[in-house]
């Protein structure tokens, strides 16, 4: 396991994520919610245990935005209230022990991780090329 540091754009929020070898990759999410939340083509993510994320600065001040996911259950997004960097979200469908971390905000992650898989391929923009194994929605569990 390796510790990866992350920080938001303004520096008010800092965190460390402890990742297993197989978690040191980006899962590209092409869903339409990710497009709206990021203003971009897809987001970079990894599902990790809740306890693997340690918010070392600004954790008591995080903003929270909740929406209803495809499952009909809540998705709680946590972001820096000053600069809006989206650090992670917690899906009620995944239970309290797992979160979805934005791997693109890890200092070494954005430089070194490569795409591990693509999800919500059904919503991929027509000009976006496939770069990893793609699932129409989610991998079969
Ligand atoms: Zn910030
Ligand atoms: Zn998404």
Image: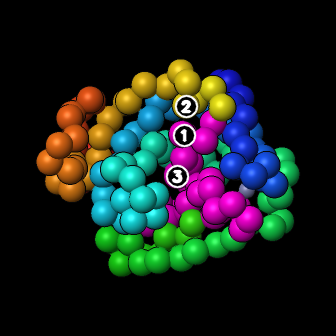
The relative height of residue 104 versus residue 39 in the rendered view (above or below) is above
Residue occupying the point 47% across, 77% down: 67
Residue occupying the point 62% across, 56% down: 85
Magenta span contains residue 117 = no
Residue occupying the point 32% across, 35% down: 117
The quadrant where residue 106 appears: top right
Q: Is residue 46 visible?
A: yes
First of labels 2, 1 by sequence position:
1
Q: What's the mark number on residue 100? A: 3
Q: Marks 3/2: CA distance?
A: 16 Å
Label 1 CB less than 8 angstroms from ligand 2 = no
**Spot occupied by residue 22 in the image (x, y as percentages of width and height):** 48, 26
Of residues 30 and 36, the one nearer the viewer is: 36
CB under 8 Å between callouts 2 and 1? yes
Which residue position holds label 1? 103
Nearer the observer, disc 2 or disc 1?
2
**Spot occupied by residue 26 in the image (x, y as percentages of width and height):** 44, 35
Which residue position holds label 2? 110
Q: Which residues are magenta?
A: 78-106
Magenta span contains residue 103 = yes
Nearer the observer, disc 1 or disc 3?
1
The quadrant where residue 80 appears: bottom right
The quadrant where residue 15 appears: top right
Q: How is the image coloured?
A: rainbow
């Amino acid at each position: 396991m390796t510790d990866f540091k992350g920080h938001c754009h303004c520096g008010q929020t800092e965190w460390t994520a402890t990742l297993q070898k197989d978690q040191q990759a980006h899962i590209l999410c092409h869903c339409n919610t990710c497009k709206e939340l990021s203003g971009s083509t897809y987001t970079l993510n990894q599902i990790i245990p809740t306890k693997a994320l340690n918010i070392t600065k600004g954790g008591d001040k995080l903003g929270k935005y909740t929406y209803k996911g495809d499952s009909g259950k809540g998705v709680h997004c946590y972001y820096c209230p000053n600069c809006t960097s989206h650090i992670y979200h917690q899906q009620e469908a995944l239970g309290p022990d797992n979160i979805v971390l934005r791997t693109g905000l890890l200092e070494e992650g954005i430089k070194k991780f490569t795409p591990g898989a693509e999800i919500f391929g059904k919503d991929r923009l027509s000009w976006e090329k496939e770069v990893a194994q793609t699932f129409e929605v989610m991998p079969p569990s």
